[in-house]
Structures are given as structure tokens and as C-alpha cells.
Image: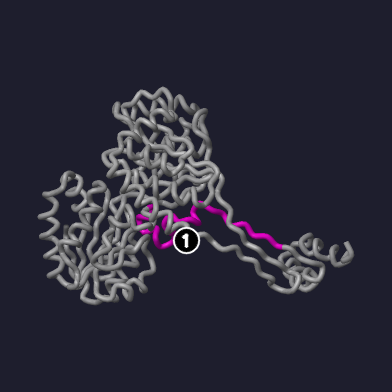
Amino acid sequence: MQTFIEPPVAEWDALTERNIPDDPAVERAVKAIIEDVRDRGDVALREMALKFDGMTVTALEVSEAEIAEACAKVSDEVKAAIAIAKENISKFHEAQRPASVDVQTVPGVRCVQRAVPIDKVGLYIPGGQAPLFSTVLMLACPARIAGCREIVLCTPQGHGQPIAAEILYAASVCGIDRIYRIGGAQAIAAMALRTESIPRVDKIFGPGNRYVTKAKQQLSSVVAIDMPAGPSEVLVMADSSADPTFIAADLLSQAEHGPDSQAILVCDSQDIATAVDAEVKRLTMQLSRVNSVEASLSHSRMIVFGNHDTMLDFVNAYAPEHLIISMRDPWTIASKVRAAGSVFIGNYSPESAGDYASGTNHTLPTGAWARSYSGVNLDSFMRKITYQELTSAGLTAIAPAIITMAGAEGLDAHALAVKVRMMNKDL
């Protein structure tokens, strides 16, 4: 990891860049995939499963028998861990239920807001080297709590191997309605557009690679998406109260996600940076994915600022997906953070806790989108509808304001809709 000492603000744009090159080839490839799914439906999905995943697929939907067989293969230890995580995730998201709003703005004018669930949601769960069954819990638990009527899940099955048993078990205990063995941009297209087998959903959730992210962006005009989310990232803030081994482990836990992931250390002394760098090198050799980790670390960095306010300014400019604060008085530091997906407070709050079992959601905005997007929460699976009821007296009270404003905007019929009622108050 390269170290930067007191970099000037003029260099911050470069230092906050992610390793996400703008690749026109990805743009074109995803557009072609979407059009193929739109035109040929299930036939296109089967051909792409063979082309991209090396899998001949007959039935796109995973059968109940397959799910039951997979569930039987999951160890009791993993089942117990999933149960703990599910309980904590559910507890935290249950507490997020929004209260209804019912206000009389003036006598005779009642305004109400009520939250209702999104009817149909689609969950995308990546496969690959790390089958993210934890993401099933993070998405399906709040969807069920919100009351979504239909929850479908897409996940790839490749190279003659079954879908990870843990993914199917987590989907089963969370009450997923239907599961499909399809991945990549084509899965996003299928859930957005509908095929013969896969229903169209109202909103799509879940992380993925550049192709999945690009598909969500390209299809956002026909289906709602959770957020822009690409390769994962962590930023650790540290002072002399931090443990260099803890920090190194946190950086590596992000780097092992893949070569596109990014790990950043922002600290207040070069001594900390040096100690962390040594620990990163030592601990890397203990990991199973050394090549992936080293590729990620090649575009990760350590940045030293002597001033805590400057550290915070840089953090807010970077807007990390995950922010770990390993500093004295961390809640005071956290109160000044304006842009982050999820914040981990103190030396004993590793990102891993939020990734799995603390209860917060690990589906978070990346690539500086934390400046304008929240992570997945209960509201993500709900819509809020407003209602208003006016009595004759209530309409009379605000009629002059309505008529004046409508006239100023040149919308005569808007004003007329009030005037005719004023002339017929007994109706």
C-alpha cells in the first residue's frame, strides 16, 4: 500500500478515486445482454448460462426438492450462526417501522402519510468464489418485515456445481417465494423485463460485479433499484489508541472481496501507517486468497494527516461504504461524519460484525454514492402514500392561497376546481 503524507486538497480527487475504470466494452456488452433477454426471454437466459457460467440449464427455477436437499447439507454450526444473524437483523429492522403521520394543518384540512410495502421485489445474490448467503438475510429479512407480497431471488449456478447450499438454506428460512439459477446482467434484465419463467418485479436489490451494476443502471428507467453499488470498500480512521493488527485485519477483510475492492487508512501519524503496513504484509501471507488481496492492495492507500479535522474532511470527500473509527472519543468523531454507508465505532467493532450478525444491513452504497444514498433499510422495501381530506370549511380557509398561486402559474383550471366548489358549498 502506498503512503501519502499530508497530501494537499488539490490531490484529493485522485486519492478518492476508486478502481472502477469506465469501460465502454462493458456498457456495450450489457446493452446487448439486455436486448437479448428482452427479445428471446428464457432461450437467451439458457444460452448465457452455458456461455458465461458453463452450465446447461433445463429448469431455471430451483425446485423444492433441490432446496430441501441443500438444506440437509448445511452444518448445524452454520445453521445456528444463520439463526443468530437472522434474529439480530430482524430485531434491528423491526425497530425501523415508520409511524403514520396524521396532521390537521388548519381546521378542516387533514393530511395523512402511510407506509405500504412494495409488492414484488427481486434479490440478486452473487455466486462465484464467495457465495454471499449473508446477503440473502440482509435483503430477505427486511423484505418480509415490510410485508412485500412476492420475493424472488436470482443467483448463478456454474461449471456443473450446485448453488451453494447455504444460499438455498438462508433463502428457505427467510421465506423466499421463488429461486432462479441465473446470474449476471442477464438476471437483472430478466427480473426487470420478465421472461417466460421469471416474473417482473417492482424493485431490484443486491450487489454484483461491473456487469450487474451496469445492468441495474441501464434498466433503472423500467425498474427501481436499491442503489448504485460496485466493488466494496472500507476506510479506517486511526490514532495512537488503535491496534495496528486490528486495522490490518480490517483492511484485509475488505481486500479479500476481490481485486476491484479498495482499503484506505487515514491516520494522524506516520508511525501508525508504518506499523499497519508491516501487519498487512504479515497477515496477508496467512490468507487463502493472496493473489486477490494483493491485487486489491495495489490500488489501496494509507494517508497521514496531522489534524483530525482534515482527516474528517478527507473522509467526507471519500464517502466510504464502510467507515471504521479507531480513535479516542469515537462518537464525537462520528458526529462529524456526513457521508458514509455504515460506521463502526471503536476498536472492537470490525466491519465483519456488520457484514454478518450485528443487525445493521451490509448492502451499502459504494463509489462515493454515500453522499446521496442510504444503505438498505426497511424504508427501501416500502413506499409512502399521502392522503388528504378537506371539509367545506377547510377548503374555504385555503382557497384564496390556492386560487392566487394557480393564477400566478397560469393554470386556470386548477383555480376553477376550487371556485366551483366555493359556489356549491352545500354539495
Position of the N terminus, as image quadrant, is bottom left
> Which residue is drawn at the image coordinates 33% and 34% (left, top)?
72
Work out whether residue 267 or residue 388 is closer to the camera in this orientation and state it: 388
Position of the C terminus, as image quadrant, is bottom right
- Magenta segment includes 385: yes
> Which residue is drawn at the image coordinates 26% and 65% (left, top)?
11
Q: Is residue 111 above or below residue 29?
A: below
- Left or right: where 239 falls relative to 203: left
- Magenta segment includes 34: no
Image spot of residue 78 (x, y percent): 29, 44
Image spot of residue 8 (x, y percent): 25, 71
Count of marks placed on residues: 1
Image spot of residue 275 (x, y percent): 12, 65
- Left or right: where 136 falls relative to 224: left
What are the residue bounds of the magenta stretch?
363-388
Mark 1 = which residue?
Answer: 95
Work out whether residue 77 or residue 407 is closer to the camera in this orientation and state it: 77
Q: Is residue 175 above or below residue 53?
A: below
> Which residue is drawn at the image coordinates 55% and 44% (left, top)?
149
Image spot of residue 393 (x, y percent): 81, 71
Q: Is residue 84 above or below residue 9?
A: above
For mark 1, give the secondary structure.
loop
> Which residue is drawn at the image coordinates 15% and 64% (left, top)?
244
Q: Give the amino acid type for the residue marked by disc 1 in the picture.
A: Ala
The image quarter in which residue 397 lies: bottom right
Work out whether residue 189 or residue 122 is closer to the camera in this orientation and state it: 122
- Left or right: where 249 falls relative to 349: left
